[in-house]
Image: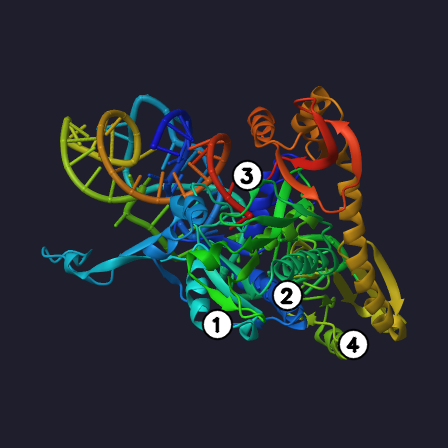
Amino acid sequence: MAKFLTNREENYAQWYNDLVIKAELAENSAVRGCMVIRPYGYAIWEKIQAELDRMFKATGHVNAYFPLFIPKSFFAREAAHVEGFAKECAVVTHYRLKNDETGKGIIIDPEARLEEELIVRPTSETIIWNTYKNWIQSYRDLPILINQWANVVRWEMRTRLFLRTAEFLWQEGHTAHATSEEAMEETLKIINLYADFAENTMAIPVVKGYKTESERFAGALETLTIEALMQDGKALQAGTSHFLGQNFAKAFDVKFTDRTGKLDYVWATSWGVSTRLMGALVMAHADNNGLVLPPKLAPIQVVIVPIYKTDSDLNAISATALKIKSDLESAGISVTYDDRDTQTPGWKFSHYEFKGVPVRIAVGPRDVKNNTAEIARRDTLEKETIPAGRIKEHVVRLLEDIQKNIYRKALQFREENTYYPDSWEEFKNIIEDKGGFVMAHWDGTPETEARIKEETKATIRCIPIDSKEEKGKCIYSGKPSGRRVLFAVAY
RNA sequence: CGGGGUGUAGCGCAGUUGGUUAGCGUACCUGCUUUGGGAGCAGGUGGUCGUCAGUUCGAGUCUGACCACCCCGACCA
């Protein structure tokens, strides 16, 4: 076990924080609540971006970019939206600084006040719908399927690396449609895309479902979510897709003429995932030895470590290692050969294990003699000695197997930590003692939802799309219920 | 915004009732020996003790104000 890492079972929050910092994913910056994403962390984010971007484009979306600043008045147009974001906005009031009259330091030039304050975007619906007004006149202009990769700012009270930061990176899709049905179809298409990405690329199983009214996005008629279970029993909202109805079209007066010549407001969706996914990746898979990265997102998939005493040993070992490297690279695998003589092999083993590199290959004099290599996998820490001729096929299969295995492990964890209580007592005990996903009956009222939150801190994460109809009684009020919904304490 | 805590070397920390030249671990640099799971020994570099003011012959230590950050709540992707 890594001795410099807080034990996961002792203090999960500290373990997470230590890991993010020591694995060099990110660190706190000089600006409160804002993080520096370090190269290794950013490399993972770039892989997340690349795959999502590919998926968006494959489903007909294109990228564009809208301004960082939004005129304050835009926010006032959609009532629920302003209600939802007003309390956490950064505001630009001036555009110039000047030297202090005493000559010490710099002050805001009071002459340079903006006529209208600018809000640093917490999300871009308003600036985008103000723009769409100019782009849409007819059904022939629809649909618009745009995605934007951007940073946004939400002035959070309390922040945590990746999970909640004042500034974060994300993508936000904003689509415009001629009909309600088409917009709803888009909303569902994207939540399915997110679920596919979470499960097949990040190896994190998720529950898809509808948010209740009180958990809905500010300004949405319907919010779909994917919810993941972390190793400490808390839920993490990993992505959301919103059906916005005609709310923003009405707020920004975006009308179009349909095929029959009738004038109507445009239907909208918006959807996003953020750097929070990085937090999910850590909390879903990592262990007391450090990160465990799914091969599909690992910046380094295979590391080769030479073990040698003399320079002539190293020459023979390097020849073997470089042959393995080019072999693997020809199969599209990213390989690092770490032949630095400034660190010992033991140091390198620990180092790459901590960084979550899926496969490690050690080559020493013994291997050169026997024409083999030692191959270790990060997820189970198992080691095998493999003949040189079989390394390529072995590693290709191993990477696939690791990807599947960590998903299977996460899924098994979720299944073991999903409960179906039928009494209030049982419900409270599960939430307090163990955490996890709790499927329980609910009477459908916001009042009951609020009471449960007050008494247990658990919220309704979602009404799962695939939850079966089942007659039952609300866990809290005893009133009739038609299906179970997903409760959990959430991040 | 309420409650608690912490600011001393890059990082993690100790520093007694105020008392000489502020120390330990780690990291870093040099040398030798090492290298199949974070190597060993020897030597060395590195500090406006968060900031400002006060008490005192003397302040890392006492007092006050301020600043920053962390943790716990309310708010949130």
Instruction: Report x, y in % for residue A110.
Output: 16, 56
Q: Quadrant of the C terminus of chain A?
A: top right
Q: Which one is nearer the viewer's eye here, A339 or A182?
A: A182
Q: Percent position (x, y) of residue B36? A: 77, 58
Residue behind mark 1: A137
- Tell which circle, 3 or 1, labels the residue nearer the N-terminal end: 1
Residue that numbered label 4 is attached to: A331
Residue A152 rendering spot, x and y as whole percentages: 45, 57
| Callouts 3 and 1 in the same chain | yes
Chain letter for mark 3: A
Same subunit, labels 4 and 3: the answer reads yes
- Give the CA distance from mark 4 to mark 1: 50 Å
Instruction: Report, in whole angstroms, how far the alpha carbon at label 3 lies from the one at label 1.
Output: 34 Å
* Residue depicted at x 22% and y 63%: A96
- Mark 1, chain letter? A
Check if mark 2 and mark 4 are on a common chain.
yes
- The mark lying in front, picked from 4 and 3, is 3
N-terminal of the pair, mark 4 or mark 1, is 1
Indicate which disc, 4 or 3, sits on the residue closer to the N terminus.
3
Looking at the picture, do discs 4 and 1 lie on one chain?
Answer: yes
N-terminal label among 2 and 1: 2
Quadrant of the image occupied by residue A188: bottom right
Pinpoint residue A234: horizontal percent, then vertical percent: 64, 38
Report the mark closest to the observer, 2 or 4: 2
Q: Amino acid at mark 4?
A: Ala
